[in-house]
Image: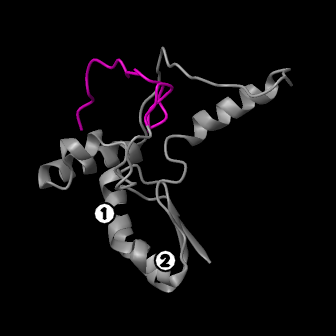
Amino acid sequence: RAVINCAGPFSQYHAEELLGECARRGVHYSDLAGEGFWQAEMATKFHQVAERSGAKIVLGGGVDSIPSDLGCMLAIDALPWEGGPIQARAVYTEYTGSFSGGTLNSGRAMSRARNEGRVTAAMEADPYLLAPGTTGADSAVGTADGMPAGFGWGLSRRQPF
């Protein structure tokens, strides 16, 4: 038995109650949450409960990565190369389109969480937020969040939510 929750923002729409019931009843749970503060809260609150019941909880499974991961996989599969590992890097030089309604609502939820004190600047800057006690994964090659060393987004303004 498993529950896949695709209705966010998860910090606003009773996902905590659903996740908690899954954790207590041994039902596997996955969602697409991109709200790191909420993921950290849920891990703290339900990790031991899920561990006891045998429930596997996957928070943010595939969020923001599925399209780029699939695109990269398809590009690599199309290469006529059989000589060893390939390192892929992506650089976005142009963006068209817009965020989905769910992403916009998650941004608004994040803004509310900041105003409520549930999110701090330190939390937003912590690449280890969901792995408390972890340090030192950054290296000369890249950072804990998977970006090349010295990477910067280069965005000059934030979108208002």
Residue 115's x, y, as percent?
13, 49
Examine the rendering and report whether any part of residue 14 can be seen.
no
Which residue is nearer to you in this view: 125 or 139? 139
> Quick one: label 2 or label 1, which is nearer the N terminus?
1
Which residue is nearer to you in this view: 75 or 135? 135
Magenta part of the chain? 138-161
Task: Give the residue displayed 28% in from the left and 39% down from the top.
Answer: 125
Q: Amino acid at mark 1?
A: Glu
Task: Give me the disc on residue 41.
Answer: 1
Q: Is 117 covered by the magenta stretch?
A: no
Task: Give the residue displayed 19% in from the left and 41% down from the top.
Answer: 121
Residue 9's x, y, as percent?
35, 55
Which residue is nearer to you in this view: 74 or 7? 74
Q: Amino acid at mark 2?
A: Glu
Gap in Å between the C-alphas at discs 2 and 1?
16 Å
Where the N terminus falls, by quadrant? bottom right
The image shows a total of numbered marks equal to 2
